[in-house]
């Protein structure tokens, strides 16, 4: 089985400028994703898809390849991750390289654990899933969510659960937004059943604001720095 890791990292991040190479506790944040991927030993190639020469240089410094640069069409604010993945797969196919599985790891995932990548790959390869990715349980039961109207009035979305004990409510999960494994069919993303691995909340943090960034650094220190 040939496995490809793609780390999308365009240069034009808006909310946190230069986000993908911003210093995170002593090294560019993208380095953590590259190192986690390499540590698994699963990949025939760990590549960074970028339109930015500085990002490309840093990616190579930490062991990733940048065999070609991202096009302008997939580097704008409207391109989706799927657009980027398909472009990369198409470029490899033109070069005569076809892979069996693809893992997309986001560049701002410093809390990612190599073992999670391995566990998700095992689930993908041993089951009938087309895609597998990590999820985390909601920290508060979503069944108790409230709807707030424009006039400030409020009501329960599911009033039938008002008197239910938290431990009796169904567990629900959300995407961690860190990485995704896909099976490939003739060099393109396969479709089908989606699988999950469950990870703990201390390894999950969206990083969209400066406050998010500081929270991620705090979590990383709690996990790794004694």
Image (cartoon, rainbow, N blue to C red):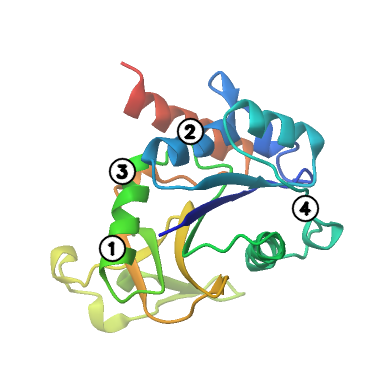
Residue 70, numbered circle:
4
Read off the residue under disc 2: 35
Read off the residue under disc 1: 123
Q: Answer yes or no: do the residues labelled 2 and 4 have beta carbons within 8 Å? A: no
> Can I make out residue 140 in this image?
no
> Can I make out residue 68 in this image?
yes
Instruction: Describe the element under mark 1 as helix, strand or loop.
Output: helix
Query: Furthest-right residue in view?
Result: 72
Q: CA distance from mark 2 to mark 4?
A: 21 Å
Q: Residue at x 63, y 67 (%)?
A: 82
Question: Which numbered disc, 1 or 3, marks the residue that appears first in the sequence?
Answer: 3
Q: Name the image quarter holding the C terminus.
A: top left
Residue 115, numbered circle:
3
Nearest the eye: 169 or 37: 37
Q: CA distance from mark 2 to mark 3?
A: 12 Å
Residue 76 on image: x %, y %: 81, 58
Crowd band around label 4 with a 10 angstrom C-alpha radius: few (<14), some (14–19), many (20+):
many
Nearest the eye: 204 or 129: 129
């Amino acid at each position: 089985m040939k496995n490809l890791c793609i780390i999308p990292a365009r240069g034009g991040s808006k909310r946190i400028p230069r986000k993908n190479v911003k210093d995170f506790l002593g090294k560019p944040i993208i380095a953590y994703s590259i190192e986690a991927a390499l540590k698994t030993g699963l990949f025939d190639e760990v590549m960074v898809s970028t339109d930015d020469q500085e990002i490309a240089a840093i990616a190579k410094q930490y062991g990733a390849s940048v065999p070609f640069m991202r096009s302008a069409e997939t580097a704008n604010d409207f391109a989706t991750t799927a657009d980027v993945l398909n472009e990369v797969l198409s470029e490899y196919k033109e070069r005569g390289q076809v892979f069996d599985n693809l893992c997309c790891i986001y560049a701002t995932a410093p809390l990612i654990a190599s073992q999670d990548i391995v566990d998700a790959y095992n689930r993908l390869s041993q089951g009938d899933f087309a895609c597998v990715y990590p999820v985390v349980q909601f920290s508060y039961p979503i069944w108790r969510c409230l709807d707030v109207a424009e006039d400030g009035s409020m009501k329960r979305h599911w009033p039938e659960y008002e008197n239910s004990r938290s431990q009796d409510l169904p567990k629900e999960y959300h995407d961690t937004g860190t990485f995704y494994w896909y099976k490939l069919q003739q060099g393109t993303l396969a479709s089908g059943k989606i699988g999950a691995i469950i990870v703990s909340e201390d390894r999950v943090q969206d990083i969209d604001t400066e406050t998010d960034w500081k929270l991620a650094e705090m979590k990383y220190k709690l996990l790794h720095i004694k």
